[in-house]
Amino acid sequence: MDLASQPSQPLDFTPFLDQVRRNTDLSNLMLQDARIVVCLGSRALLAAFLGWIENPDHILGAATTEDEGLALVEQHQPTMVLLSDQLERGHGVALVQQIKARWPQIHTLLLITQEQRHRQIKAAIDACCDGLLVESRMGLGAGVAALQAVSGGGIYIDKSLQELFRRGHEGGAPLEPLSPRELEVLALVAQGKGNIQIGEHLFVSADTVKTHLSHGMRKLQANDRTHAAVLGLRWGLIDWPSTEVPR
């Protein structure tokens, strides 16, 4: 039974408690090096997320409005910002746009409260938001997968939003075809793996990975590694990263 698929029906949450606890433990493990600012319109969700994190050093600041969130990002320069599209004052998408315009190296994961708001979602995509997650799927595995991918520098797009993510870009193509090895490297970049991890996976050196990635970025005319992964996904050159969570 998929909890997120039946949001309007009464539901006994008890069978999901073990899964929620397990996913919470995984979140604590994979956030070892993350420095996060949280900006959520729901105070209940904000309190719940802060409660999931065992090490308070991961969280540099928390807010519920656009202006406060931007001030915290400017002050702390986090590695990642978790935010929602609906805030108590201001808008999450506008905050994503400001963050990416001023600090493109900061990873952003946007929680979507309503999947039907295509214009806002498209604006977040165009602003190079690194992750889009439907809020109702936050607690049962998808949240862990999204946090893991985005905090590592990868891409996460909720399955229900992938068609919108690709819309209007299906006909795109690189300047010249990427080699099989370049595509392998690009797919691993999309999963959030660094050059050393990719090298270990492919049994090559980190310098070799860097060379393959550089060639791929040139062919894709990408600004950086994340942009290259985005183009690879939009153009169907690589498969979507797995959203399965280890058990």
Image (cartoon, rainbow, N blue to C red):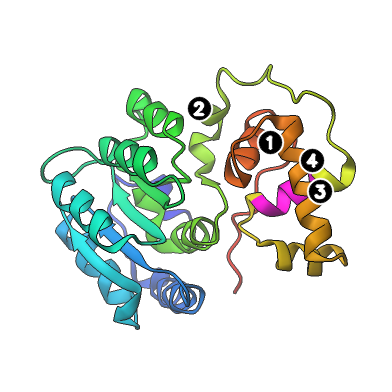
Disc nearer the start of the sequence (4/2): 2
- Residue 80 is left or right of residue 184, and the answer is left
* Cα distance in 3D space between marks 4 and 2: 28 Å
* Residue positioned 44% across, 41% down in the render: 129
Which residue is drawn at the image coordinates 43% and 78% (left, top)? Answer: 28
| Residue 190 as seen in the image, left or right of residue 202 | left
Which amino acid, by three-letter code, is at mark 1? Gly
Alpha carbon of mark 1 to alpha carbon of mark 3: how far? 14 Å
In the rendered image, the vertical position of residue 18 relative to residue 106, given as above or below: below
Q: Position of residue 242 (x, y in %)?
A: 65, 54
Residue for badge 2 = 164
Q: Do the CB atoms of the residues marked 3 and 4 lie less than 8 Å apart? A: yes
What secondary structure is marked by label 4? helix
Q: Secondary structure at mark 3?
A: helix
Residue on which disc 4 sits: 215
Q: Is residue 208 left or right of residue 118?
A: right
Measured in 3D between alpha carbons, the distance from the residue under mark 3 to the one under mark 4, in whole angstroms, is 5 Å
**Chain-order first, disc 2 or disc 1:** 2
Q: What residue would you read off at disc 1? A: 232
Q: Left of 204 or right of it: where is 32?
A: left
Q: Amino acid at mark 4?
A: His
Element under disc 2: helix
Say few, some or many: other residues with alpha carbon within 10 Å of mark 3 (under 14 / 14 to 19 / 20 or more): some
Q: Which residues are magenta?
A: 183-189
Q: Residues within 10 Å of mark 1 (few under 14, many from 20)?
A: many
